[in-house]
Amino acid sequence: MEKKEYRCTRNALYQHDCIGRDNLVPRQGYYIRANCAEEAWEEMAKRYPDETEAGFTVQEWDGKNVKVVEVKRDFDGNAIGYEDER
């Protein structure tokens, strides 16, 4: 059985100041090859054992149709514009 790729993000709030601190959307995530979503979740739990209560978001990933977009932010971190990077 060929392993699939999963995009995993940490649900716990980040402790440092960054655009993904309180918002999961801008987080890039971790890309893990696993046999199933549960196995990918378990790998995240090994990497971040203190965050298992908050959990992890695991999505099957197909990186073939990815659109890269630059998000411009103001001083406070608010999105002020989007620019296609094609």
Image (cartoon, rainbow, N blue to C red):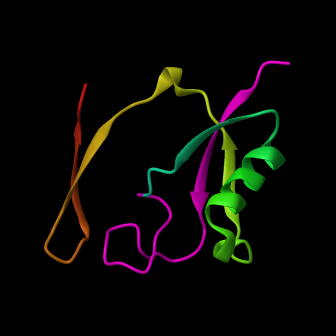
Specify the farthest residue to the right. Answer: 1
Q: Position of residue 53 (x, y in %)?
A: 74, 77
Q: Position of residue 25 (x, y in %)?
A: 47, 59
Q: Nearer the viewer, residue 59 or 52?
A: 52
Q: Is residue 20 left or right of residue 40?
A: left
The residues colored magenta run 1-26
Report the quarter where the N terminus lies.
top right
Q: Position of residue 11 (x, y in %)?
A: 60, 69
Please name the predominant secondary structure of the magenta segment in the image. loop
Please count the marks in the image. 0
Q: Is residue 30 left or right of residue 15?
A: right
Q: Position of residue 9 (x, y in %)?
A: 57, 57
Look at 68% across and 70% down and name the residue there.
49
Specify the farthest residue to the left. Answer: 75
- Residue 2, by quadrant, is top right
| Residue 34 vertical position relative to residue 27 in the rendered view, above or below | above
- Residue 32, by quadrant, is top right
| Residue 82 vertical position relative to residue 48 in the rendered view, above or below | above
Q: Is residue 16 magenta?
A: yes
| Residue 35 vertical position relative to residue 12 in the rendered view, above or below | above
Look at 75% across and 25% down and name the residue there.
3
Q: Is residue 72 magenta?
A: no
Look at 77% across and 54% down and name the residue there.
42
